[in-house]
Image: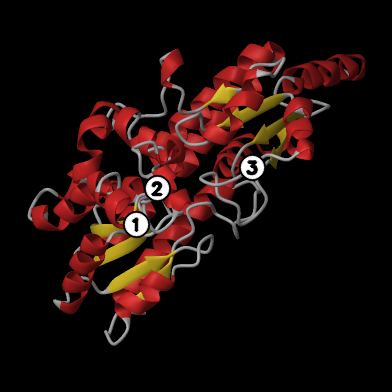
Amino acid sequence: MPAKLPLLFVSFLLSTSAWAAPTVPVKLLTSIKPIQLIATDMLGELAQVDVLLPPGSSPHHYSLKPSSIRKIHSADLFIWGGADLELFLTKSVSQLERPALALLDDTDGHPVESEETGHEDEHEHEHEAGHEDGHEHEHETGHEDEHEAGHEDGHEDGHEDGHEDGHEDGHEDGHEAGHEHSGDPHFWMTPERALVAADMIKDRLVELYPDNAALYQQAYQRFEQRLAHADQQLQEQLKLVSDVGFFVFHDAFSGFVEHYQLRQLGYFTVDPGRKPGARRLSEIREALENEQAQCVFVEPQFKAPVVDSLIRGLDIRVGRLDPLATEVSAVSGGYVDYLESLADSFSGCLSGK
């Protein structure tokens, strides 16, 4: 029996080595914090995941520095949203020796869309399909506003600011293109689309490092299980405030709103870098005065004095939603933490607690 112990020990080492973390974790760089959260939450110690944009920066209006370009080139894999979300990265990504992974890249046939939302997002996102049962008028605000963003704002605001006029020609710095061609580019707002993103990351890592394929697959499966459990809990939490109306500062949360069947009445702007038009502000003010909405949500990345002036004199609660997860730690469980923080923000403001 003692003579067999070394062999048993060696067999144990061989059987467990396939599930041990690589000696040198892969170095990933993501363009924005939400992608970093998804990758870190899934991979844990299998990867060192850094983020390109500094805290508080927005992919809508960011200029690359030479140090940022060097950072992109030094990563084992650069993961970004794609040109629809981050137009400023297109040139740098095209010059990489190691191809980047674009999570919203329609050209390769793998857009980040679930089977449920993939086709519908292209045609129904603007209608906020999850609420067509009785909230049609409320959704007209969001639907009409998206088109007005390229027309009304262009006429009313465009002459006030040449920079704004540049955004109102229908391109919106790459953001409007995301709405017209690829659905909602804020894919990290829904668990099912985040899971597709994680699957794409896993597949690329398996392609690059096939010896670690079993590790990446196991990490993905664990992430899928955690996400399903968290999603079920959030469904129960948000069900309690699903009938309370609200406005958001910019159109970044539609995926979350539709998934959890919340009552979003509209948004102030499609592009947070420009002012909403007079017609839209009038419609929002009317909805607030008629007590259709109980809460207005602002964002930490943008100062929005127009919100303060619009709600002045009204008994309206103001909440805060962070589309870029600035204050969420990039650790294992970080993406789930982010979804929970969004749910808590909605619950707190909509319930008045």
Q: CA distance from mark 1 to mark 3?
A: 24 Å
Q: Earlier in the sequence, mark 1 or mark 2?
A: 1
Tag shown at residue 63: 3
Disc 3 packing (10 Å; few <14; some 14–19; many ≥20): few
Q: Quadrant of the C terminus?
A: bottom left
Disc 1 packing (10 Å; few <14; some 14–19; many ≥20): many
Q: Amino acid at mark 3?
A: Ser
Q: CA distance from mark 1 to mark 2?
A: 7 Å
Asked if the residue under mark 2 is in contact with the one under mark 1, i.e. CB atoms within 8 Å, the reply is yes
Q: Residue furthest front?
A: 159
Decide if residue 331 is on the left or right side of residue 347.
right
The percent position of residue 38, horizontal first and vertical second, equals 55, 40
Q: Residue at x 29, y 64 (%)?
A: 247
Q: Where is mark 2, residue-wise?
A: 165
Q: Earlier in the sequence, mark 2 or mark 3?
A: 3
| Residue toward you, 314 or 7 | 314
